[in-house]
């Protein structure tokens, strides 16, 4: 059975899959070197078409929808925090 996305990402970043879960869950402790590696990997991956790597279209759509929800929630939280400054 192939590795899941978190395991694959962890391998590319040279970290444990649990670290990926912690980053995803927005744990406050993120080391600078991991942040920089993540940014570089994002830059490398953002232009790729997941379907070209065998990712099922339904999985692509689900992942993009979840990312959009997270982005919207993050934006709303940032706006709420800015109102309280």
Image: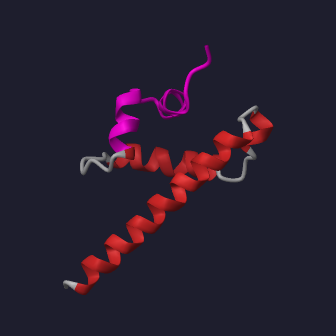
Closer to the camera, 68 or 49? 68
Closer to the camera, 11 or 63? 63
| Colour convention | secondary structure
Q: Is residue 75 magenta?
A: no
Q: Residue at x 62, y 18 (%)?
A: 2
Q: Position of residue 33 (x, y in %)?
A: 38, 44
Examine the residues drawn in magenta and state their main secondary structure. Answer: helix
The image quadrant of residue 76 is bottom left
Q: Position of residue 42 (x, y in %)?
A: 57, 50
Residue 21 vertical position relative to residue 62 in the rendered view, above or below: above
Q: Quadrant of the C terminus?
A: bottom left
Which residue appears farthest toward the right when viewing the image?
A: 52
Which residue appears farthest toward the top when viewing the image?
A: 1
Residue 22 vertical position relative to residue 69 in the rendered view, above or below: above
Q: Residue at x 32, y 40 (%)?
A: 22
Q: The magenta stretch spans which residues?
A: 1-23
Q: Position of residue 15 (x, y in %)?
A: 41, 30
Closer to the camera, 66 or 24? 66
Residue 85 vertical position relative to residue 11 in the rendered view, above or below: below
Q: How many marks?
A: 0
Q: Position of residue 62 (x, y in %)?
A: 60, 47
Question: Position of 49 compared to 39: left or right?
Answer: right
Q: Quadrant of the N terminus?
A: top right
Q: Residue at x 27, y 47 (%)?
A: 27
Question: Position of 74 compared to 63: left or right?
Answer: left
Question: Position of 35 compared to 47: left or right?
Answer: left
Q: Is residue 4 magenta?
A: yes
């Amino acid at each position: 059975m192939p590795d899941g996305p978190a395991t694959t990402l962890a391998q590319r970043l040279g970290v444990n899959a649990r670290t990926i879960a912690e980053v995803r869950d927005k744990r406050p402790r993120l080391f600078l070197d991991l942040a920089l590696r993540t940014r570089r990997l994002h830059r490398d991956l953002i232009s790729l078409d997941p379907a070209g790597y065998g990712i099922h279209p339904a999985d692509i759509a689900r992942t993009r929808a979840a990312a959009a929800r997270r982005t919207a929630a993050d934006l709303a939280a940032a706006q709420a925090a800015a109102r309280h400054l």
